[in-house]
Image (spheres, rainbow, N blue to C red):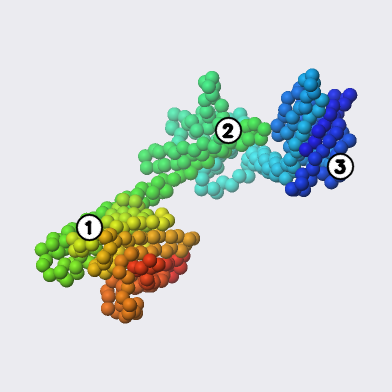
Amino acid sequence: MFIDCPTDDPDVAIVVAEAKPRTSKSLYKGRVSGQRAIRFNEPGVLEALEKGEPTVGTRAVSQEGVFISQNVVPIFNAKGKVIGVLIREIDISEAMEKEKQVQLLEETTELLTENLLRVAIESGTLPGALHDGLLVVNKDGVIVYVNPSALRLADVIISSKKATLQSEGNNIAETELCDIVLVKDQDGSMRFSEEYRSCEYSVGERIVNVSWVPLLSKGFVGGIVLIRDITDVRKKEKELMVKSAVIREIHHRVKNSLQNIASILRLQMRREQNRTVREALGVCINRILSIASVHELLSQSGLETVDLHQILRMTVERIVQVENELCDCDVEISLFGDSINIPAYYASNIALVVCELVQNAMRHGFRGSNKDKGKIVVYTKQKGSSFELQVIDNGVGLPANFDFKASKKKRLGIQLVDVLVRETLKGTFHIGSGLEGGVLSSITFDVDRVNTERV
């Protein structure tokens, strides 16, 4: 912070007071009081002294040659006359250095642009073996270079009634290329576009992309027209769209078939009197519907990734519908955690895992429980390429003598989860007691590891 006062010289002020910062390093090595501030180095200071108005963010050079930004506020006496200015300075030398580097890059770009155009016009050494068509236009709109590929592609964009590109020297306005090269001003006059432009032309089965690249060096100095045959690219895109639609339709039909099977099994379950058989049919229905949920999502959202929360929500809702017909318990299921997009080929396995864990929690966690309402929480978490999924309930908990290895041999559900997690997801499965009773089941897997082992 400084206070400067005017002198007899209108282009010079003098520093009469200074205050250095106490919490950071000063911009100055020595004292500044008593030194002069000249207009050439500190224009904002002299302007504020003259006009009596504050200046903000004025660039200046300090007495020690450092680039600074100044905020200057005039100081008035009782009669309203400017007797000095209060100055706050900030070091901007680093920002100025970056600006110099950017300016140097701009100058280098302009120089390369001029050299490219000069080479095209004077020596004609631009490569003629390029697959893409290449035309160089000078500042007068005359085509000064045409490569062989441009001649082959020109029939797509230039009609027989217009000038051809068989020889150099045609004016760009005499061809249909002027549609992309020229733009209309507000007064109706045409001028060369100073911005990159691109469009596609189609004649019969041929499709070409035409791009206009203006060359600027203190104004328009010429430009380049690039012509690329993209017929094969568009055909492949169309084939991919057709294949994608077919695959989505396949997923839709598989989903319908699975739901039909589940509906038949549900009818059989409702007619069955034996409780053990009914529960076995319910397990089958849940597994089928969990896979159907994945195919339903794939038929809607595409092929690469699916939303894990959508899979979990649909799977849980369908399990609840089936289990409510078999159990007399009231269970609330909640879904929390990160919203995660997972590769589609993991979806069916994760849906089956969640199906087994939620199904076990509803069947074994709340039967015989004296709780008014059971709760199941499905929690998801992602950290980089690592995923974690937990199923937590507040049911009766695990038996006192629970043995995980023995349960894998006896219980198909636990065995299925363990195999899917270890063999398919290359992850780990853990089941144990929760913090507030009940059971906590968790699976973790790393996408990068799975991808590596799949390759």
Image quarter where the C terminus lies is bottom left
What x and y, as percent, mark residue 66? 79, 42
At 53% from the left and 29% from the top, the residue drawn is 182
- Tell me what residue is drawn at x 76 percent, y 22 percent: 51
* Type of the residue with mark 2: Glu
Report which residue position mark 1 lands on.
321
Marks 2 and 3 sit apart, C-alpha to C-alpha, by 52 Å
- Residue with the mark numbered 3: 31
Q: Residue at x 41, y 57 (%)?
A: 337
Asked if marks 1 and 3 touch (Cβ < 8 Å), the reply is: no
Q: Given contact means CB atoms under 8 Å apart, are the residues at marks 2 and 3 in contact? A: no
Q: Secondary structure at mark 2?
A: loop
- Foreground mark, 1 or 2? 1
Q: Is residue 7 left or right of residue 410?
A: right
Q: Is residue 220 left or right of residue 81?
A: left
Q: Nearer the viewer, residue 435 or 66?
A: 435
Of the two numbered discs 1 and 2 on the same chain, state the one appearing first in sequence: 2
Identity, as a three-letter code, of the amino acid under mark 3: Arg
Q: Secondary structure at mark 3?
A: loop
Q: Quadrant of residue 335?
A: bottom left
